[in-house]
Image (tube, rainbow, N blue to C red):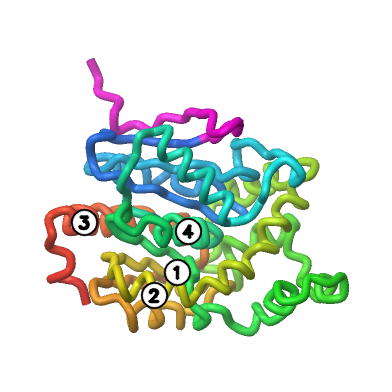
Amino acid sequence: MQNYRHKTRHETIDVNGLDIFYRHAGDPEMPAILLLHGYPTSSYMYRNLIEPLAESAYVIAPDLPGFGYSSTPSADAYDYTFGNIAETIDAFLAALGVERFFLYIHDFGAPIAYYLATRRPERVRGLIVQNGNAHDEGLGEGWDAPKAYFADPSEENRAKLPDWMNFETTRYQYVGEQPERLARLYPPEGWHLDWERLSRPGIIDIQFKIFSDYGSHIRRFPEIRAYHREHQPPCLLLWGRHDPFFDINEIMAYHRILDALEIHVFESGHQLLETHHRECAALIARFVLDVEAGAFRDSAK
């Protein structure tokens, strides 16, 4: 009989009354990799990464509440903060029986990942950071208006925010301002699917609630630095250098603190896996094997 263990399964599980949709593959006895997506995506962004990694790991990619095919309760029924979403993902992991794991950190997945990591550092086998921000160095001038709004969420400051929750900016999340030769590498299904899910009634309001809590993530940067400095998690950093949201100086902020760090920069944008999933899968698989063998700290940097 054919072995389907390495094939991606698509399931939904009840987590404290929420339906959490997730994709997973591999042997649950192998080291687990938790893939956390950001805005405006879903677990679909990992579709090309899951099966290659499942040969040597148990790979789990949930849709966060308010995203993809997971539940989207109203803001009155669910607290759309990164801390509370992390609680939901923690309960999701408990329902699956996953105790320790590698964290794949991307975009809005970064605040959630670092809540999980700082609350129980012993659970984290290693970090895989892909265009996920955790330092002031990564927030360029484009973040001035959002930071002003986070400090004072007045209607006046909200009016100064760019109009980014629309179809055109959803596409921009992928191609940004990259040269046409690179923009042509991105399949349009990604941003069309994202916008189809985001444009459902009430979802934009939910997404703005989540975005409004990003200020709490920024305020936690010193705590995250302390976590890096004290626990020194092995880290693989994968970066699309044409990211229009997070400055490439973010890379050096990680470099200054972490001792066991490997960095790879690609000719791509914020959604790196759309163009370089094969390269990233190979690097992640090797990283996981090296960390589990205790060899990564000797070979990094």
- Residue drawn at (43%, 33%) of the image: 95
Residue identified by numbered label 1: 240
Of residues 89 and 143, the one nearer the viewer is 89
Residue identified by numbered label 4: 115
Q: Secondary structure at mark 2?
A: helix
- Residue drawn at (63%, 48%) of the image: 194
Q: Answer with mark 2 or mark 1, whichever residue precedes in sequence.
A: 2
Residue identified by numbered label 2: 226
Q: Is residue 142 above or below residue 132?
A: below
Instruction: State which region is magenta.
Output: 1-21
Residue 171 visible, this angle: yes
Q: Answer with mark 3 or mark 4, whichever residue precedes in sequence.
A: 4
Quarter holding the N terminus?
Answer: top left
Task: Estimate the spatial distance between the alpha carbons at disc 2 and disc 4, rounded to whole Å.
Answer: 13 Å
Task: Estimate the spatial distance between the alpha carbons at disc 2 and disc 3, rounded to whole Å.
Answer: 27 Å
Q: Residue 230 vs residue 154: left or right?
A: left
Q: Amino acid at mark 4?
A: Tyr
Q: Answer with mark 1 or mark 3, whichever residue precedes in sequence.
A: 1
Quarter holding the C terminus?
Answer: bottom left
Task: Estimate the spatial distance between the alpha carbons at disc 3 and disc 4, rounded to whole Å.
Answer: 26 Å
- Tell me if label 2 and label 4 are in contact, CB under 8 Å: no
Residue 193 visible, this angle: no
Dot 1 surroundings within 10 Å: few (below 14), some, or many (20 or more)? many
Dot 4 surroundings within 10 Å: few (below 14), some, or many (20 or more)? many
- Tell me if label 2 and label 1 are in contact, CB under 8 Å: no
